[in-house]
Image: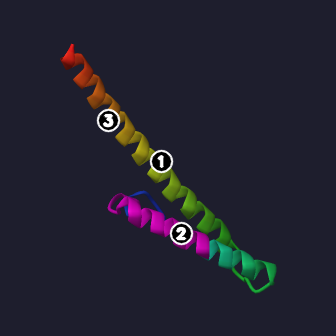
Amino acid sequence: MVKNKNELQGKTITELRSMIVNFKKELLNLRLQQSSKELTKSHKIRYTRRSIARINTFLNKQNKITKEESNAKARVKRKSGK
C-alpha cells in the first residue's frame, strides 16, 4: 500500500507504472475473492483502489510539471530568437 507521496518520489516512471499494474492485478484478485465470499478483509479493496489513484495522481502531476517546464523553455527560446 502507498501511504504518502514520499514513497513515490524516489521511483522512476516505469517503476510507478509497474506498481499500478501490480495493484490492478491485486484488485482483480480481491474482487474475485469477494465474489466467491472468500475475502474476509474487504477494506483491502478500498486501500488498493486508493493506492492506484495516488500513483496516477502523482504521475499526472509530474507530467504536468514537465510540460510546464518545456513550455517555459520554448517561450524563452522564442523571445531570444526575435
Label 2: element kind: helix
Question: Could you classify mark 1 by the number of other residues whose Cα lies within 10 Å: few (under 14), some (14-19), or many (20 or more)?
Answer: few
Compared to residue 57, the image places residue 70 above or below, namely: above
User: What is the spatial separation of the Cα atoms under label 1 and label 2, in whole angstroms?
Assistant: 16 Å
Query: What residue type is disc 2 on?
Result: Val
Q: In the picture, residue 63 is in which quadrant?
A: top left
| Picture coordinates of residue 45, whole percent (x, y) | 67, 70
Task: Tell me the magenta residue range.
Answer: 8-25
Q: Is residue 7 magenta?
A: no
Please tell me which residue lies in front, 44 or 58: 58
Q: Which residue is mark 1?
A: 60
Q: So how many labels did they put on this image?
A: 3
Q: In the picture, residue 34 is in which quadrant?
A: bottom right
Q: Which quadrant would the C terminus be assigned to in this image?
A: top left
Which circle's residue, 2 or 3, is located before the other in the chain? 2
Q: Which residue is mark 3?
A: 70
In this view, which residue lies farthest toward the bottom?
38
Which circle's residue, 1 or 3, is located before the other in the chain? 1
- The numbered disc on residue 42 is none
| Picture coordinates of residue 80, whole percent (x, y) | 19, 18
Query: What residue type is disc 3 on?
Result: Ser
Q: Which residue is mark 2?
A: 21
Please tell me which residue lies in front, 3 or 66: 66
Residue drawn 55% across and 63% down? 51
